[in-house]
Amino acid sequence: MEQQRTPGVEQPDRPDDVFEEARTARATVDEHGLVTGWSEGARRLLGYPPEEIIGKPAACLLGDVTAGTLSAIRALPRWNGRVRLRHRDGHPVDAGLLAHHRVGARNPDWLVVSPLADTAAIPGDELLAERSFQQTTRCGMAVYDTRLRLRLANHYAEDVFGLTEADMRGLRHSEILGPSGDKVERAMVQVLKTGEPQYLESYMPAPDDTRQPAWLVFAYPLRDADGVVRGVCVCGHDMTEQFWASKRLQLLNEAGTRIGTTLDVMRTAQELAEVTVPEFADFTAVDLLCDPDAVRQGASTAAMGSVRLRCVAHQSVLPGTPEAVVAPGEEHSYAPASPMGQCLATGRAVLRAEYDSQAADFSMGDPRRDAAIRGFGIHSLIAVPLRARGITLGVAVFARHEWPEAFGAEDLLLAEELADRAAVYVDNARRYTRERETAVALQKALLPQRLPRQVAVEAAWRYLPTGTLTGVGGDWFDVIPLSGARVALVVGDVVGHGIQAAAAMGRLRTAVRTLADVDLPPDELLTHLDDLVIRLAADTDDAAPPDHAAETAEGLGATCLYTVYDPVSRVCTLARAGHPGPALISPEGTVDFLDLPAGPPLGLGGLPFENAEVTLPEGSVLALYTDGLITMRDQDLDQSLARLRQVLSRPTACLDDLCDAVLATLPLEHRTDDIALLLARTHALDARQVATWDLPADPAIVAQARRLVRTQLSTWNLMDACFVTELVVSELVTNAIRYADPPIQLRLIHDRHLICEVSDASSTAPHLRRARAYDEGGRGLLLVAQLTRGWGTRHTRAGKTIWAEQALGSEAG
């Protein structure tokens, strides 16, 4: 098939060899000096066929080149010059060589090229010169023929390439520049194929330029009067300054996205180090002051010698960060005269563009650090203070030893900008860590440290704070012993996180315990707690009005589940305020989520709470929890409840093991809140531990009540408590007959203590008062209070119950 031709473009005679490789003598030599490649052009130049020369030492081809010259050449990335070579038949060949050290390849080697003599000039050079512009300020121009062999180059191109036009004449672009010229050469091929100009960016090495130079390259066709392409002109505009300005901007943008992703001080410092290596420095270290108050701007440099810092992060271009002599977490100090000491003393960045390790003020204050600077050849340093909100937090150190270029004034500005950004994030993390530690300590002090001893339930609990991003929450739980051997189980959650949430949690927990001591039913207790939350919210500056439900979350809001269990009747009374309902595990292992009346969250006001009563078989387990257990990121509520139901249904004798099993199933990476979990296995009092008598409202019955009590205590083998119990019964029954309404009931409960209860139909509660010298009454309750562990009144639907509790055994003493 005939090859399609592009109009106006002269096609090479051999389209499979656009460059006509035979026009250049090319050879490759490995690091051991052995020839590994040999082109047809090399055979034409020196007469050796490939099979005779490949694998032989390249030195056998050289004439008058000494071993010292070869060693000097090997130390350079590129070398060019004229040498005398040996032809196969023995006669000398004078040739210009250009050698590239290709260190980036898998097997580093040398590429050696030489233009053949018969390509030094061809007809048409005058036309190419006429169609191009030889002298252009700050623009390197080179003209290539249709074989993409260089024919002309202006003076700026000669300066850029570091070669004269004569040295380059007849060579390809990639032969002049090595591998870095391949991209431009491919663009030149496209110009020949399509006749269209090509634009691209290139990073060509330039002599004596320690920075990576950037070029905007424009390759366009050179046509004759008939419009036929006779060559390609390549123009290179030096865009190095713009390129590095763009790199600095990119680094700042990257710092904005990569620094400060967490509220962890060490991670934030490490992010600064990772952003700057290797894009800005070869080694970065970040040190924070152990005591930020120890450094004040304007302090004397000499005073900096006693300042202690803690290494928090470092990063290096070398594996294992060998430049670092202090591990993260270790304390150290810098010499006062060092750049870091001066930086901390003045509060300003310090630049040592050409750092001299032999200078008098060289020492960093640690011989290991001094040795590392010399050993790795660190030649340029920047020390920048990490300052935020007027406080010096530490210092960031940037060093170069692999980069040949020293830090400059623009680098100093960039380092200051990076350090300023990082310092704000470090200070945020430091403040957050301090606040979190305070909140954790406060929360730990406010939460129960151990569960109280009681007989109604066996309880176990777990509290799992959330991750560091959201902070400590306001979740709480409690187990509160009540009168009559009953127990209250509480779980609550304050909206928000941090110290404010922990403090609010402590106030609410205290309020719940106070209200529980009054022995209110769950619905009434939540009503009083709701009023308290409204008052607390009104006391804050940003509290929402109580009648604006939508704004409650901006002030103080909370949820709560309050449960009272009576081991005598096995009745559990529950009420909730916007809180998840509990799970009930039957003795057979069946798990149900109790459907309680949905009460509003605390703090809304004006809405009622309702009680629900459930009779529990002995050995049932109630699972109370906060919403952090079932509210997960990327997991709906039904899935969470199904997961909880599954783990709770596992047969487990130990409640602590069940708590651990529940938490072990949590997808921790999806947690969004604290978790409080309270498990309680119910117990029931045996009927033989409870004695109940209905008494008529007759004063004569008091003596019979004492006899009934004495007989029961004898049955329980508690005669040691008989005297006090008879006295208590006499006082309570007498008061009920004298001041209250029938029916009157007397009940004794024997668990860990001895409880005496007298119930009546009156809602009037007695109270202690100090009797005067000639008063006939008023001393009975005072006597009861002195002889018992405690006494009190609880209101019921039918009236009230007055109770007194006595210690037994060792507690009685």
Image (cartoon, rainbow, N blue to C red):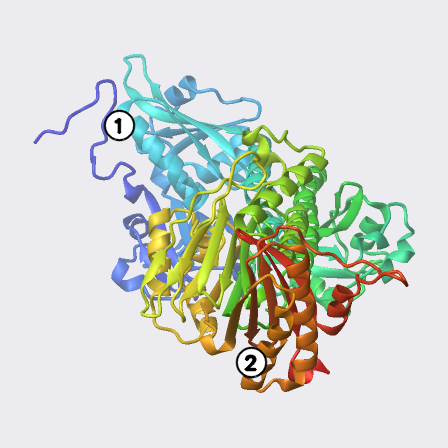
Which of the two marks, 1 or 2, is nearer to us in this view? 2
Q: Residue furthest left?
A: 1
Residue type beneath disc 2: Gln
Q: Is residue 171 above or below residue 725?
A: above
What percent of the width, then of the height, locates residue 191? 32, 27
> Position of 12 compared to 557: left or right?
left
**The image quarter in which residue 721 lies:** bottom right
What distance separates the C-alpha of mark 1 from that of mark 2?
115 Å
From the image, which quarter does the N terminus lie in?
A: top left
Identify the residue at image location x=55%, y=49%.
Answer: 493
Circle 1 residues within 10 Å: few <14, some 14–19, many ≥20? some
Choose between 39 and 344: the one closer to the eye.
Answer: 344
Identify the residue at image location x=60%, y=61%.
Answer: 697
Residue to which mark 2 is pinned? 712
Q: Secondary structure at mark 2?
A: helix
From the image, which quarter does the C terminus lie in?
A: bottom right
Residue type beneath disc 1: Lys
What percent of the width, then of the height, locates residue 43? 29, 52
Please say whether residue 87 is visible from this viewpoint. Answer: no
> Position of 775 compared to 427: left or right?
right
Circle 2 residues within 10 Å: few <14, some 14–19, many ≥20? some
Please say whether residue 485 is visible from this viewpoint. Answer: yes
What percent of the width, then of the height, locates residue 571? 44, 61
Q: Mark on residue 193?
A: 1
Choose between 482 and 797: the one closer to the eye.
Answer: 797
**The image quarter in which residue 121 lies:** top left
